[in-house]
């Protein structure tokens, strides 16, 4: 009999297993300021009088606009370090029988995204790979600074927790683009599907992250696992507890309609374009002023407190400890064979 405990499921690796695997890899170097560590967004390398910041991220759960997504998702992880992303290295893997038109679209989308943030491609790799059902891109983003680098671990007790931007928007856009037929069958109006797709153009946090970087203790962009996973990673990296009120998260009505139709939790859904920041109380008013000037939706959802690196979620039923690895809700769409229904 096969023991399911010996096999991996979708999503990020369990933290304990990932820690064990990382310990197998050499990562000690006098110039490595921040190496592979759970909860930290990007590596930091001391370089002469400054710091090189680098990060790699794959796009595996979308089929449309993956070139656009690959650039912005990786760029966000540099920006939340307080550093402008500049250089990019894409690895593009596509299934056999992919059309040349599709390939051109992927690269055109990458080009549009790069121009929007002032980035350039400095190398990469492209191949036709066997046994793929859809294209996959792994993107490396790199930036450089002579100033402060922000670490996820720097969240301090007393900091306020702010959720900024379209929570669940990225996931809603992916679902609306890749699973239109399924949504219509579930009673979602076509106009809602059109609106949801627009979130794909709002997934960059580069501008807002760089605008608020001088007033935060930590920033984290919620990608796989959504805002709850991002909050858990901040708690774990900092060694402090984070208490948030589920009722205070700003969920757009369009996202809610998409997620309700499929029985998904927007707080556990792909959320590139949203941003979680921990802010010392003395800077809270300044942060709010900047966000208002940018026209960003935001809410103060909780607080960092002394503890053991845990996430506590408050709602109408009381307080819940979130201590399990969060599998992104997007995988439920694929796991429930909705892709076959779409076809």
Image (cartoon, rainbow, N blue to C red):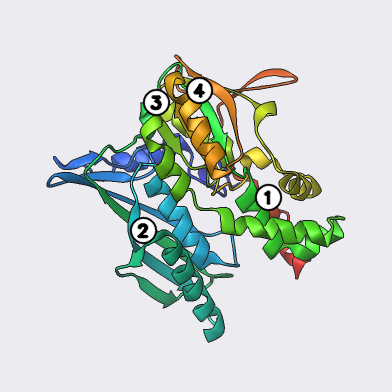
Which residue is found at the position 53% from the left and 38% from the top? 291
Give me the C-alpha separation between circle 1 and circle 4.
32 Å
Mark 2 or mark 1: whose residue is earlier in sequence: 2
* Tag shown at residue 79: none
Q: Return the residue at label 4.
A: 160
Secondary structure category for the residue under label 1: helix
Spot the residue most to the top: 306
Mark 3 or mark 1: whose residue is earlier in sequence: 3
* Tag shown at residue 140: 2
Q: Return the residue at label 3.
A: 238
Mark 2 or mark 4: whose residue is earlier in sequence: 2
Which residue is found at the position 52% from the left and 20% from the top? 303
Given this view, does label 3 or label 1 mark the residue nearer the observer? 3
211 or 18: nearer the eye?
A: 211
Secondary structure category for the residue under label 4: strand
> Does residue 142 sit above or below 91 in this rendering?
above
Give me the C-alpha separation between circle 2 and circle 4.
31 Å
Q: Residues within 10 Å of mark 1 (few under 14, many from 20)?
A: some
228 or 326: nearer the eye?
A: 228
Residue 209: percent from the left, percent from the top? 44, 43
- Badge 2 vs badge 1, beta-carbon distance below 8 Å: no
Q: Which image quarter holds the C terminus?
A: bottom right
- Left of 97 or right of it: where is 75? left
Mark 3 or mark 4: whose residue is earlier in sequence: 4
39 or 51: nearer the eye?
A: 51
- Badge 3 vs badge 1, beta-carbon distance below 8 Å: no
Which residue is found at the position 37% from the left and 29% from the top? 153
Q: Return the residue at label 1.
A: 332
């Amino acid at each position: 009999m096969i023991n399911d405990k010996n096999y991996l499921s979708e999503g990020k690796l369990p933290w304990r297993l990932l820690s064990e695997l990382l310990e197998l890899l050499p990562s000690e170097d006098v110039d490595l300021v921040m190496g592979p560590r759970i909860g930290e967004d990007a590596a930091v390398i001391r370089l002469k009088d400054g710091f090189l910041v680098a990060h790699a991220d794959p796009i595996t759960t979308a089929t449309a606009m993956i070139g656009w997504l690959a650039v912005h998702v990786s760029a966000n992880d540099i920006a939340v370090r307080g550093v402008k992303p500049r250089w990019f290295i894409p690895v593009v893997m596509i299934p056999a029988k992919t059309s040349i038109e599709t390939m051109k679209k992927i690269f055109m989308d990458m080009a549009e995204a790069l121009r929007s943030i002032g980035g350039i491609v400095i190398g990469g790799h492209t191949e036709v790979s066997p046994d793929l059902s859809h294209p996959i891109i792994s993107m490396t983003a790199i930036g450089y600074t002579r100033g402060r680098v922000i670490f996820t671990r720097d969240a301090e007790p007393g900091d306020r927790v702010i959720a900024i931007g379209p929570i669940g928007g990225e996931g809603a856009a992916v679902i609306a683009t890749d699973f239109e037929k399924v949504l219509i069958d579930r009673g979602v109006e076509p106009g809602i599907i059109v609106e949801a797709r627009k979130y794909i153009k709002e997934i960059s946090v580069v501008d807002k992250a760089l605008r608020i970087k001088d007033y935060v203790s930590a920033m984290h962009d919620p990608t796989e696992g959504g805002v709850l996973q991002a909050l858990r990673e901040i708690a774990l990296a900092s060694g402090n507890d984070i208490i948030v009120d589920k009722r205070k998260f700003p969920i757009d009505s369009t996202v809610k309609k998409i997620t309700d139709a499929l029985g998904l939790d927007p707080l556990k859904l792909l959320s590139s374009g949203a941003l979680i920041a921990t802010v010392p109380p003395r800077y809270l008013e300044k942060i709010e002023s900047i966000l208002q000037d940018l026209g960003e939706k935001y809410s103060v959802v909780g607080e960092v407190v002394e503890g053991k690196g845990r996430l506590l979620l408050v709602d109408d039923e009381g307080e819940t400890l979130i201590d399990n690895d969060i599998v992104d809700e997007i995988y439920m769409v694929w796991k429930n064979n909705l892709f076959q229904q779409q076809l």
